[in-house]
Image (cartoon, coloured by chain):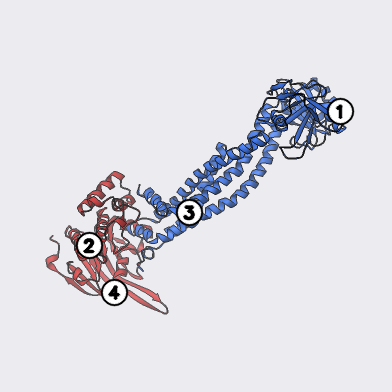
Chain colours: A blue, B red
Amino acid sequence: MEVLALVYRNLRARPVRSILTLLGIVVSTASMVLFLSFGEGLRKALGAELSRVGPAILVLPEGVDAFSPGYPELRPEVLKRLEALRTPLGITQVIPYVVLTRGGFDPQTAFIFQGLPQGLGPQSINPSLEAKQGVLVPGARGAILGERVALRSGLGLGRTLRISPTVSVKVEGILKGSGGLSDNVIYVPLEALQAALDTQNYTAIAVSIAPGHKAEEVAKAITARIPQVSPQTSGDVLKFAERAVRISDLVRFGISLVALIVGGLLVANTVMMSVYERIREFGLMRALGAKRRFIFGLVLLESLLLGVAGGVLGLLLGEVASAGVNWYTVGEVGLALSSVTFRLAAFALLVAVILGLLAGFFPARTASRLRVIEALGRV
Amino acid sequence: MLEAIGLHKRFPQGDTAIVAVDHFTYRFGPGLSAIVGPSGSGKTTLLNLLAGFDLPDQGQVRLGETVLSQQSEDARSELRLRYMGFVFQQWNLIPTLTALENVAFPMMLAGKRLKERQARAGELLEAMGMGRRMHHLPHKLSGGEQQRVAIARALSLNPPILFADEPTGNLDSASGAKVIELLRAQAQGGRTVILVTHDLELAQKAERILHLRDGQLIREEIIPSLLPTP
């Protein structure tokens, strides 16, 4: 009890300094939480997005990943060869599509078009989608709009949308909001997009398989028979995304490390000053019979307490900041891009504890190695 | 119980060295012993050596069969905790602990249970006339009250040896007299009390007075009427 009272009262005895130090840790922990919450948010959003996708395999041109499909490169022969594999590989549906982005990278002005074969609507790719207004399957020159893009552009049923100088489509349906990427997509007939791009090629081909068949095995069989394509299962996409997010996690952690080191130095400075101010007190304790490890533990506990308190408050502040970021990104692109998951919270607290221990180690060692007569001023 | 044998301590100063304690030999028994001498006579250095705060260049301090200088720092801390109590002139109390917590502090180091140490600390403070002030922090206490708390703390583990280094140095005469009475009472009870002071009048309260000059024991005075009754 006396030990905790000693630690707590010593921190309270110098309130301004303790609060400023605490703020240093709070800000550094909060910045780390916020930085790393983007990776967690991306993982979550991607997982949710993939769980909504119906087809098990996405066939892309060799060397292209699912996140940056680029110009349509898959030639019609690939589609024909895939169709021929329906029976031997247990393929139930083959959906070729084209993706076209117009209006740059600003989510407020960009338009993402997805061209689907005649007679198929967005439900063929994402079965959970429902119509809010109009139809779910567009006609030969019709378009189905995601809720967010319709609202943002003020496009209602019957309005005309120009894809290129020669190709225009009419809005025939608006989807209910799903909280995913499809809220920002305009679904149009495949031929319309191919005409706009003056190509017969496809960006990707979505492949559904019959129950009982394994996506990984079918993907492997497709690769073996059509070498110029790269079939990707949702597992492959997740793995690729995980690699990319992990690298960006490391970069963001590296940046937040600077803030963490500054926070750690603040704690070390405060505890060291406190040690110098209390040299006589430590001398007295040693004179009364306290061993070196008691003094070491006492100082380390003070630093640890600052670390833990700063970590908890920093985590809370990080959560608030993450909520603020999500409020903005949901408004902009309909996706919550930041997430403070349990593992991130646990990691942040662990880092704060380690920070407290590391920052307190040197001052604690200094305090525990003081000679009694010098500390008591009895030389 | 506590014996100094040929204690010698020098402090280097430039090309020369100052001899602070010069081959001091003495066996401290139960009762109040006063070490007196003018400033610079080596009183504080002698106390540092006797308590194991510092190590002699030559000679040894024996606590029973144990030679203090052969023990590690932590082992000497442990011996102080079990066998010695201390009352200093100043910086006596831990400023962030209440009087009760200060008295309970050595008991906590010794691993006593919370209830036991609180009860014992309370009893000791009551006995020192500090019952009503036990929950006050040191800065709320007068100098005399602080010294009484320090005496209570020194007695908390019931050690056989009590060191008091200028315990009345910062006190008015009434408070000083009260502190000395408390120390004498401990000596009368059979404890070895070693009082270090430059005040000859105060030293007259002891039954043995050791006169120190230039680190040497030049005279031992015994006042038989004050010796504890066997």
The reply to whether the C-beta atoms of the residues labelled 2 and 3 are less than 8 Å apart is no
Badge 3: chain ID: A
Residue B68 occupies quadrant: bottom left
Quadrant of the rendering where the C terminus of chain A is positioned: bottom left
Q: Amino acid at mark 2?
A: Val
Q: Amino acid at mark 1?
A: Pro
On the image, the x and y values in percent for residue A67 come to: 74, 36
Q: Are marks 2 and 3 on the same chain?
A: no
Q: Amino acid at mark 3?
A: Gly
Residue A360's disc is 3
Cα–Cα span, label 2 and label 4: 21 Å
Residue under pointer 1: A76
Q: Is residue B146 left or right of residue A221?
A: left
Residue under pointer 2: B193
Residue B178 occupies quadrant: bottom left
Q: Secondary structure at mark 3?
A: helix
Badge 1: chain ID: A
Badge 2: chain ID: B
Q: Are marks 2 and 4 on the same chain?
A: yes
Residue under pointer 4: B39
Cα–Cα span, label 4 and label 3: 40 Å
